[in-house]
Image (cartoon, rainbow, N blue to C red):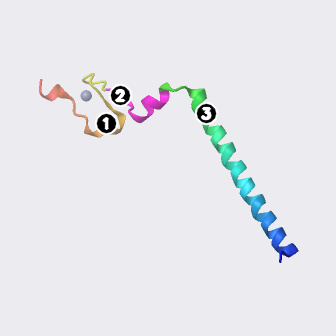
Amino acid sequence: MLSIGKILGLAVILFVVWQVFKFLETQKKIRESQSSGRGSDEQGTASVDMVECPDCGKWYQAANQSAHHCDEDAK
Ligand SMILES: [Zn+2]
C-alpha cells in the first residue's frame, strides 16, 4: 500500500534527481561553449606546451623545463 508519506518521499527523490540532472546538463553546456569558443587549436597545444629556450634556441616541453640542459657547455 502506498502511503502519502511514501509518495511524497518518492516525489522528493525524483525532484532531487531531476535537479542534479539539470545541473549536470548546465555544466556540460558551459564546458562545451567554453571549448568551442576557444577553438580546437588550444586543445592540441595545452597538452604539449612547447617553449623555446632563450639561451640555446632549443624547443622543450614547458613541463620538462627543469630537465632541459643547454648545449652551450659542450661548445
Ligand atoms: Zn637551452
Q: Could you give the CA–CA distance between mark 3 and mark 1, rounded to whole angstroms?
A: 29 Å
Q: Quadrant of the C terminus?
A: top left
Are the residues at dot 1 and dot 2 in contact (C-beta closer than 8 Å)?
yes
Give the extent of the magenta segment. Answer: 42-52
Which one is nearer the viewer's eye here, 40 or 14? 14
Task: Quote the CA–CA distance across marks 1 and 2.
Answer: 8 Å
Residue 24, above or below 75: below
Q: Which of the pair 6/24 is nearer the observer?
A: 6
User: Which label number is shown at residue 51?
Assistant: 2
* x and y, in percent, of residue 53 in the image: 30, 26
Tag 3, which secondary structure?
Answer: helix
Residue 54 is labelled as none
Say left or right for 71 vs 23.
Answer: left
Mark 1 sits on what residue? 65
Q: Position of residue 4 (x, y in %)?
A: 87, 73
Give the mark nearest the N terminus, 3 or 1.
3
Label 3: few (<14), some or many (≥20) within 10 Å? Answer: few
Sequence order check: which comes first, mark 3 or mark 2? 3
**Amino acid at dot 3:** Gln
**Mark 1 or mark 2, earlier in chain:** 2
Furthest toward the front, the residue is 1
Q: Tell me the kind of residue under disc 2.
A: Val
- Residue under label 3: 34
For image coordinates 65% across by 44% down, the residue present is 27
Q: Amino acid at mark 1?
A: Gln
- Mark 3 vs mark 2: give the one in front: 3
Side (left or right) of 30 relative to 11: left
Discs 3, 1 touching: Cβ within 8 Å: no
